[in-house]
Amino acid sequence: MAQFSDQVILITGASSGIGRALALELAPRRPKLVLAARDAQRLEDAAATCLRLGAETLAVPTDVTVEEQCGELIARAIKRFGRLDALVNNAGRAMWARFDELTDLAVMEEIMRLNYLGSVYCTHFALTHLKQSCGLIVAVASVSGLLGAPLLSGYVASKHAVIGFYESLRIELAGSGVGVTIVAPDFVQSEILSRAVDAKGQRLNKSPLDQKKLMTAEACARRIVKAMGRRERLVLTSARSKWARWGKLLAPKLVDWIAAAAVQGDY
Ligand SMILES: NC(=O)c1ccc[n+]([C@@H]2O[C@H](COP(=O)([O-])OP(=O)(O)OC[C@H]3O[C@@H](n4cnc5c(N)ncnc54)[C@H](OP(=O)(O)O)[C@@H]3O)[C@@H](O)[C@H]2O)c1
């Protein structure tokens, strides 16, 4: 419990799903939590719950696709708490459409701007402070950032970009004291699928997968906290993703089949 006490931890996408669960999982360890997302009310709700659980909190409504807002977010965190020990780049969104059926390409750009550039912007503004604290960067990517998955091509591409960026940054930061933990979850219960857009750019409003069959956001958050404590390099959350990582070299067609079955909820 003492491990995160008084540490300043900034989490983007903290208003729902994995980000909110992570904030709540960390809160009893008495950190100073900076919570960011666009929805100010939901962010305040998350902050109030974390406060009750033992954390000091600062909620900063932020759209991480806007570079200036990311700079302001980090500046607000430093102004309030004077340091930054961990940055968790978690804000993200998905799509649910075949590429050859897309009628509006905007989603490809929007997803890349949020999932990839949003993380890059926050990391850029946080890096000086993380070097001072020998801190930690956590990139919440996806197992799809290591493989392929149908209906998610733009999302998968953005997560490949995230993983490539942080793998490279880790090498650049060797000797600086700053750690990089990449989290690559399999499907997790959250709002990401119901918020995903279809081929016409319309929000699904309903998860295409049975959420009850997926890992809970709380279990995912517990795994992330463990990885943060150990400064792990890469976190995979399911047996099939651990297998698929190696299976891709040995039996790539089988891994493609598993990915196709996974989005149908069949495997
Ligand atoms: N759930 C899964 O199956 C799964 C699997 C692998 C990886 N992941 C990754 O886990 C991360 C969290 O997703 P989740 O599953 O917890 O989804 P979620 O429940 O939809 O949460 C997404 C969070 O991102 C925030 N967000 C969205 N657009 C934003 C923006 N422009 N600026 C700032 N914040 C923004 C949302 O808050 P606002 O709308 O208030 O801004 C929300 O807090 C994502 O990076 C996702 O790719 C999820």
Image (cartoon, grey):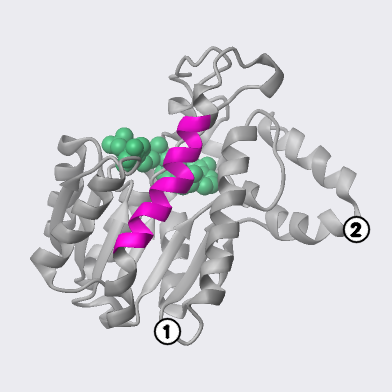
Residue type marked 1: Ser
Lateral position of residue 192 relative to residue 69, left or right: right
> What residue sits 41% from the left and 58% below the top?
221
Relative to 88, residue 101 above or below: above
Q: What range of the chain is rendered magenta?
A: 109-125
Lateral position of residue 121 relative to residue 210, left or right: left
Q: Which residue is mark 1?
A: 176
Q: Are the two marked residues, 2 and 1, in contact with CB atoms closer than 8 angstroms?
A: no
> What residue sits 42% from the left and 84% below the top?
176
Q: Residues within 10 Å of mark 2 (few under 14, many from 20)?
A: few
The kind of secondary structure element at disc 1 is loop
**Picture quadrant where residue 257 is located:** top right
Q: Which residue is mark 2?
A: 250
Camera-side residue of 147 and 79: 79
Of circles 2 and 1, which is in front? 1
In the rendered structure, which disc, 2 or 1, sits on the residue that comes first in sequence?
1
Any magenta on residue 136? Answer: no
Q: Note whether residue 232 is visible.
A: no
Q: Note whether residue 50 is visible.
A: yes
Instruction: Specify the principal SS of the magenta part.
Output: helix
Quadrant of the picture in which ligand 1 is shown: top left
Any magenta on residue 110? Answer: yes
**Residue 181: where, in percent of width, then height?**
49, 68
**Residue 232: where, in percent of width, then height?**
52, 74
**Residue 68: where, in percent of width, then height?**
25, 46
Relative to 203, residue 267 above or below: below
Relative to 46, residue 98 above or below: above
Quarter of the rendering occupied by the N terminus: bottom left
Q: Residue furthest bottom?
A: 175
Residue type marked 2: Leu
The kind of secondary structure element at disc 2 is helix
